[in-house]
Structures are given as structure tokens and as C-alpha cells.
Amino acid sequence: MKGRSDFTVDDEIAILSPVLRTGKGFYVATLLLLSIMGWAFFAWLNQITFGLGVTGMNRPVYWGIYITNFVFFVGISHAGTLISAILRVTGAEWRRPITRAAEAITVFALMVGPINVFFDLGRPDRVLNMFLNGRLQSPLIWDFVCIGTYLACSLTYLYLPLIPDIALLRDRSSKRGWLYRTLALGWTGSPGQKHRLERLISVMAIIIIPIAISVHTVVSWVFAMTVQPMWHSTIFGPYFVVGAIFSGIASLIIAMAVLRRVFHMERYLQPVHFNNLGLLLLTMSLLWFYFTFAEFLTTFYGAEPAHLEVFYSKLRGEFAPLFWTMFTCCFALPFGILVFKRTRTITGTVVASIFVNIGMWLERYTIVVPSLSRPRLPYPFGKYFPTWVELSITLGCFAALVFFYVVFSKLFPIISVWELKEGARAPGTGEKPAEEPAEPVYGIRVNRS
Amino acid sequence: MARWGMVIDLDKCTACQACVVACRQENNVPFAGEEQAAMGRAIFWMQLIPILEGEYPKLKARYLPRPCFHCDNPPCVRVCPVGATYKNPEGLVGQIYARCIGCRYCTAACPYTARYFNWRAPHWPAEAADKMNPDVYVRTKGVVEKCSFCVHRIRKAKEKARAENRQIRDGEVKPACAETCPSNAIFFGDLDDPRSLVSILARSRRAFRLEEHLGTEPKVIYLREGEWDERQV
């Protein structure tokens, strides 16, 4: 580690090298991902031909893992923008190398998530009715509006800080010249341009926070606005937002660990980043526990029969294995790992993050399915198990998310070069001026040992 | 304007399921087949739901015919993103099959689980396929359907009354289930007309509606079974 907070040409080359040089790994990875997506496409064609009967859904379990995926991916999308926006607004300097990785997750999760609702439609050919006959009373329309706005804003928010780096690529390489020339929008780096860009970024960072919160709030309202047992809950808005940020941070940690390994970014994505994000993850884990506890205790104490039916199906009924796995993955394990400084290492945070994401997917599942499987009237209980079609499409969604991410990191530097440069030039901007300017590298405090 | 409602007298109901069969015939309800029905894909616009009370040997089974309740405050209509389900001025909750996108939000929001989805392309056995009711649309795969209170019969009765330049008489409109019921347990008519049979029955002390506390205001009213004990005489 260099002692001075310089940003040298070496750093620039190191960050740009994945964009400029393509190894065998890239082709292997994309081919693999594309074939998974192809398989999912085949499964979808099957579903289009024969109808939703090829899924495991039925009456009364009208919604299954498509809706689970929808909620999950939209949750992951909060990784990004929300975290990077909050860190930017609060001037947390250590954010500099991780914001773009986070923002990219947001954009791609937002592309993959809502398409699950499309998979879930009985008549996808009529999806444009949402425009032609949309009714504002329907929470699905709220979703449509909020997610649309969020996608547009987070694309902008990803793109704006990318412009100087695109210009850098335009100047440094002859590869994909037309692409970078177009996207750079004639960036020269003049003080005027820089000023405008920074203004825009900080405005966007503020705008995007309420939008991100609104998105997962209205996603939760799809459930909470009905009168169904254990859906009809006022806590669902904030509960879902907390869960979203929780799984978002976890996804970001996993993505960072992979980038660090594959692109050799050890110098930029340091243990301190994992430590800080690990602390955030720990906070969210506690918050998640608090909300879950509040939600379940009120249900239990109120003891309305229809609600209790769902409650016990989760705690000791057929959903108990999933519920307790969820609880272990979302709280017990990450808490145990992240609370100790000794285990809050890169490996530790990554392991915790993987558990959190498994747990959060299960949480979405144990919200969607149990309520539907216990209708109020005395029908036989609903049974649901996803079929190969649903599982293939789900797998395809994960593959698509990774695929977009891989392609993005091939076309653009996944770590913001110019922001690191800025950070090196003026350490601690926004924060209190660093006492020892020699300490922070790219705005990061490094433990020298 | 009428406000259509139904009264089902559980004291008279013998749970013979004639209403279920008649409804299927009248409304071109597709056949799911044994395998699909076991998966919970069968469609019943009118369904008999068993309510078991107590434990063996003191087990008591009751049956309840359940059409769509055409709630005055319908949770399904509120959530539909495209207005494919709506409440008409006469209080009927209708479904526009040609507009429905099949998101199944209405089915998930209905507290009575009275709405059904076409999981596959509709199918009829050969014996039934050429005996379709021409008055009722056939639904495609991927849309939601449910009891319509035999809206086509209401329409027909209205046209007839208009041609004869008179009001619809009480009891003139009969959905297929009411017409078929061998024990005359199902009544249909205008709840807003204080002299109609349904509105008189709806005020009975035996009258109750399902899940009334949800505030959905169903327009299907049940009459509780009376009690009979020989020692009372």
C-alpha cells in the first residue's frame, strides 16, 4: 500500500484493464450464463404455449415464486442506489470505490425483478392494458409507476458518474470508439462541465432516496392493501424497505468480493470496505429482527383465528422448515458472524451475505405463499410446489442479473476512476478534514499493521 | 334500479349439488379433469363448501353453497390494475374477460376465494362440447372468471319487461342455481325493493353473511338452520 494518497497511472491502468483486455474467463462465463438464460427461455415458451398450468400454482395459492422473485430482486435493487446515495449525501469517503458496483446492481436487479410479474401474467400479450386501462386505485399500478421512475432515475444515477470515465476510455483506447464517443457526450473535463456534473449527481443522490423507499413500500402494499391474513399489516411498508436494504447490502458485498477476486481489485476494494458494509449489514440484521418480532408478536397476541392459522403454518406447520431456515439465515448466522471484529473479515462478511440473501428470498416466499394457502373460508389448505418451469425461469433470472453485470463490467470500469482521483486529491471532502492527510488512501482509513 | 341479491336458506339446502351442476352447464364452465382438479385447478362458479364442526364422534358437517358474493364493497374491484373487474350500477361485480391480463391480484385479494383462474386452455368432454350455452361467453386460458349472478338472464328479463312495457316482477329473474334447486333453497331478486321476497328474507332473524366483519357487504345472504329438539314440544 502506498503511503501517499496519490492516484497514479498504474491505478488507472489497473482499473481499466478488465475493460480493455478480455480473457478466456469472460467468454466462458457469458456462454454459461447465456445457456442458462436460453434454457429459461425454453421453459417460458413452454409456459406461453400451455398456459400457467405448467407452474405449480393453483387455487388458492394463486401466486408463487414469480412474485417471490419479483419482491426479492426489487429488494436487491435497493443495494445500490440507496446505499451509494446515502453514502454520497453524508459524504462518507470510503464509498468512492464501491458506489458504481452498487448502482449497477440496482439497475440490473430492476430489469430482472419486474419481468417476473410479466412471467406471472396469464395473458402477457395484454400487458399494455396497464397503459390503456390502468386504474390508479390498484397497488399494481403504483408499483408500475414507482418502479418505472426508480429505473429511470437509477439509470441516470448510474450514467452520470460514468461520463468522465467513458471519456477517459474514449481517449485511452481505440476499442469500441463509437460507443464511448457517443456516451461521453463530448466530455472534456472542463471546470464548468465538472461543476455541472457534480451538482447533478448530488441532486440525483437526494432525489433517489425517497424514490427508492417508495418503491419497496408500494411493493409491500400489493400485499398489505388486501385484507388477507398476515398480509394486511401496517408495518409492511417499512418492513419491506428494511429487508430490501438488508438484501441489497448483502448482494453488494458478494459482488464486491467477486470483483476483487476476478479483476484483482484488492488494492481498491479493501478489508475496510467489507468491514464497514459488514457493520451496516449487522445493523440491518438487527432492524430486520426487530420488525419480524414486532410483526409476529402482534399477530400472536391479537390471536385472530384466520391470522393465527397462517402464523402457526409458519412457526410449526408445513412452512416451518422454510421459516426457521429464513430466521437462521437472516438473523442468527449473520449476527453471529458480523458482531465479532475477528469474523467480520472479507470471508466472514461474504459468508454472512450469502446466508442473508438465501434468507431474504425465503422471507419473501414465506410472506407470499402461506397467507394464500390458508384462505378464510373452510376450503382445503392450498399446497404449492414450484415446477421445473418456475425453477428454470428463476434460475434464468439470476443468470440474467449476473450476465448484465458481467457485460457491464466489461464495457465500463466497475470502479469509478475519476471519483478515486478526486478523493485522492482532496481527502476527506465532506467529512471533517483529515488530521493526518497521509493516512487516508482514496479517502479510506487504512489500518497499517 | 335494482340491487340484485341472493338468499340461500341453509335449512332447506340438502347439499345435493344440483346448483353446482346447473351452474356449470349454464355458464359454460370448463372441465378441469381429475388430475388438474386434484391440483386445485377446478373451476366452480357455484361451489359447495363443507364446514366441519367438532371432532369425531361428535362431528357435525354443514354445507354451504358459495357463489360469488357480489360485494357492495368488493376487494377484488379495488385492486384490479386494468379495470377488468368492476361493479355495475345494479351492484353486480362483473368480469371483462377480454381485458383481464391474468395477474390474479383479484383472486389473491378476494377473502372468499370465489374467483377462478384458467390455468390451461378450457376443455370440455365431447358430450358437453356441443351443448354450450350460446348466451354466455367462453373464456380463454389465462383469464379470471367467476359467478356473474347469471347476468345474461337478468338482461333477458329486462328486455322482455321493456318490450311488454312493465317493470321486472319479483322472482322473474332466476339464476340457473335458483331455478334448479329441488328444495327451493335459493332466492334471487332486488334487495332494494322492500317488498321483494329476498329483501324480506334478508331481514330474517336467521339471516347472516360470511365474514361480515371485513366490511365487504356481500349481497348473498344465508339463512341459518333452525333447531329442532323433540323435548321442546
Image (cartoon, coloured by chain):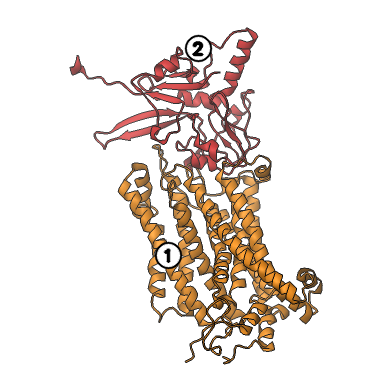
Chain colours: A orange, B red
Q: Quadrant of residue B142?
A: top right
Q: Is residue B32 visible?
A: no
Look at label 2 and name its amino acid: Asp
On the image, numbered disc 1 is attached to which residue?
Answer: A330
Q: Is residue A121 visible?
A: yes
Local secondary structure at mark 1: helix
Judge if badges 2 and 1 mark residues of a common chain: no
Question: Residue B161, percent across and down?
Answer: 60, 11
Local secondary structure at mark 2: loop
In this view, which residue lies farthest toward the left? B231
Question: Residue A5, percent across and down?
Answer: 60, 88
Q: Quadrant of residue A304?
A: top left
Q: Chain of mark 2?
A: B
On the image, numbered disc 2 is attached to which residue?
Answer: B170
Residue density around tag 2, few if under 14, some if 14–19, many if 20 or more, within 10 Å:
some
Relative vertical location of residue A172 with respect to residue B65 in this rendering, above or below = below
Residue density around tag 1, few if under 14, some if 14–19, many if 20 or more, within 10 Å:
many
Q: Are marks 2 and 1 in contact (CB under 8 Å)?
A: no
Left or right, residue A32 beside residue B72: right
Relative vertical location of residue A214 with respect to residue A308 in this rendering, above or below = below
* Label at residue A203: none
